């Protein structure tokens, strides 16, 4: 039986603290859409997506109306498209256009999975897909792309790292007239999870069922509001408050996921409890850290605060559901977080501090605007550094940086909506890492890989 007090508290969280279901994401396997004829394969992809996800948006809206819970995004993730390219050959951009057309037909916000998994090397279709990413992102609106270039088990594929630095630059150049939106839809991973419902990094892993529903819940404002009630608590008590709040938030995600699974007739995958911020006032991870006691996010002490927050969120989520997965924790995307934006504008938050924070957050360097003339080798080096943190610490890390073509440090780049806006941040380009990047090969897996 539901507790009336809990119901009323959840209603208050929704009304006052920006609590929402950030996304319900349907993961769909496209392995049975492979064909040696790329046009036939594209037709199969379109037909399967429309057949399985035809009611996704309507079901999301119905559940939202029934329970009064905002469901912000309805999304689809698919099998890494490089696997289909391996069979069909041809121009991979045809798949991107097919995905975009299906997304428009279905009314979903984004579709992820224009992806390749190359952490231990390239197989058929991988290089072709990576080379096509900039064009694919420039000719589509809703397609998101990701590439996994490293893992704790495999090490880091530095040939892929070099390619991705160039891909980021070219994606920015091809979408320069659209505020360089291309790289905002491209994530470079180490240890990418197969069940992540959040864009731009979502794809449907080969170990997943044919079709599943994954739910992403977000509530930074709820956590901050809970902490405001305990201004004199010590850090043990603060951690407990965060855990209890995360527990309540996750239960809401479990409810929505279970109901969506039943209505759509597909298995319920996971709840991803990630404190994913927005530019809206009161919906910021940085503001949580400041509520804990930092005068501004980015000062010394920020990494420790974030570590406690991330751990407490995971502990609370795991107690509320047996299906917690994805990334689950705290995101730190600069342009999407009002508090991060302010700290970056004031010069308190720098790239080096963000890199330190990624060792304890859920993902990594996310939605960071950098000067438009940043060399591809420097971007590759940023990717390599971040992948090394993930590889050594057996955690997911990622890089999503946006070279702002024609803009310099201190200028602003405006995306609008959930992607927000951000200042162009300073990065270190005084000396070049090009020789390191050009060596190629693979950084070997660390000793932590030998767990068997």
Image (tube, rainbow, N blue to C red):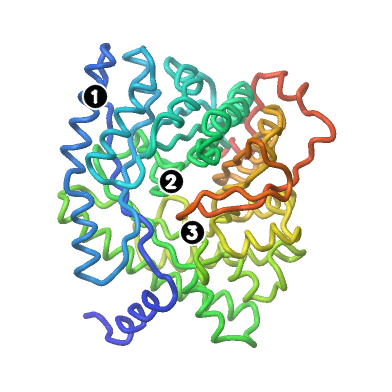
Residue 341 in percent (x, y) is at: 63, 59
- The residue to which callout 3 is attached is 276
Mark 1 or mark 2: which is in front? 2
Give the alpha-carbon distance from disc 3 to disc 1, as whole Å. 33 Å
Question: 371 left or right of 148?
Answer: right
Q: Quadrant of residue 337?
A: bottom right
Q: Quadrant of residue 380?
A: top right
Q: Is residue 413 visible?
A: yes
Residue 116 in percent (x, y) is at: 45, 28
Q: Residue at x 55, y 36 (%)?
A: 188
Q: Which numbered disc, 3 or 1, marks the residue that appears first in the sequence?
A: 1
Q: Nearer the viewer, residue 363 or 105?
A: 105
Kind of element beneath mark 2: loop
Q: Which mark is residue 228?
A: none
User: Callout 3 environment at 10 Å: few (<14), some (14 to 19), or many (20+)?
Assistant: many
Q: Is residue 112 visible?
A: no
- The residue to which callout 2 is attached is 199
Kind of element beneath mark 1: helix
Residue 348 in percent (x, y) is at: 75, 61
Q: Residue at x 36, y 82 (%)?
A: 9
- The residue to which callout 1 is attached is 33
Where 256 sits versus 94, above or below? below
Q: Residue at x 37, y 81 (%)?
A: 12
């Amino acid at each position: 039986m539901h507790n009336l007090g809990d119901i009323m508290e959840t209603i208050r969280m929704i009304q006052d603290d920006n609590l929402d279901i950030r996304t319900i994401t349907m993961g769909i396997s496209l392995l049975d859409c492979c064909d040696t004829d790329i046009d036939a394969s594209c037709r199969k992809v379109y037909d399967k997506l429309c057949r399985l996800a035809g009611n996704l948006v309507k079901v999301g809206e119905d559940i939202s109306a029934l329970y009064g819970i905002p469901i912000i995004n309805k999304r689809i993730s698919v099998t890494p498209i490089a696997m289909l390219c391996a069979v069909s050959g041809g121009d991979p951009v045809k798949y991107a256009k097919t995905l975009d057309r299906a997304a428009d037909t279905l009314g979903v916000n984004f579709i992820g999975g224009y992806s390749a998994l190359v952490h231990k090397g390239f197989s058929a279709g991988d290089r072709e897909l990576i080379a096509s990413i900039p064009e694919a992102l420039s000719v589509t609106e809703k397609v998101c792309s990701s590439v996994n270039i490293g893992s704790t088990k495999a090490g880091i594929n530095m040939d892929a790292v070099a390619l991705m630095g160039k891909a980021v630059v070219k994606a920015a150049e091809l979408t320069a007239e659209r505020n360089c939106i291309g790289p905002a839809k491209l994530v470079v991973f180490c240890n990418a999870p197969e069940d992540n419902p959040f864009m731009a990094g979502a794809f449907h892993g080969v170990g997943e069922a044919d079709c599943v529903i994954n739910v992403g819940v977000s509530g930074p404002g709820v956590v901050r509001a809970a902490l405001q009630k305990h201004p004199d608590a010590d850090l043990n008590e603060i951690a407990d408050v965060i855990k209890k709040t995360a527990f309540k938030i996750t239960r809401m995600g479990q409810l929505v996921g279970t109901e969506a699974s039943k209505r759509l007739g597909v298995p319920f995958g996971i709840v991803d409890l990630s404190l994913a911020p927005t530019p809206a006032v009161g919906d910021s991870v940085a503001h949580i850290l400041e509520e804990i006691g930092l005068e501004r996010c980015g000062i010394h002490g920020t990494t420790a605060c974030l570590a406690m927050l991330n751990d407490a969120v995971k502990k609370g989520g795991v107690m509320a559901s047996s299906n917690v997965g994805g990334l689950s924790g705290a995101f730190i995307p600069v342009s999407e977080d009002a508090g991060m934006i302010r700290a970056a504008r004031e010069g308190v938050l720098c790239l080096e501090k963000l890199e330190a924070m990624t060792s304890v957050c859920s993902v990594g360097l996310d939605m960071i605007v950098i000067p438009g003339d940043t060399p591809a080798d420097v971007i590759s080096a940023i990717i390599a550094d971040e992948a090394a943190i993930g590889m050594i610490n057996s955690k997911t890390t990622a890089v999503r940086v946006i070279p702002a073509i024609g803009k310099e440090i201190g200028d602003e780049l405006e995306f609008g909506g959930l992607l927000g806006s951000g200042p162009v941040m300073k990065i270190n380009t005084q000396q070049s890492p090009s020789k390191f990047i050009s060596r190629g090969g693979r950084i070997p897996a660390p000793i932590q890989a030998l767990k068997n």
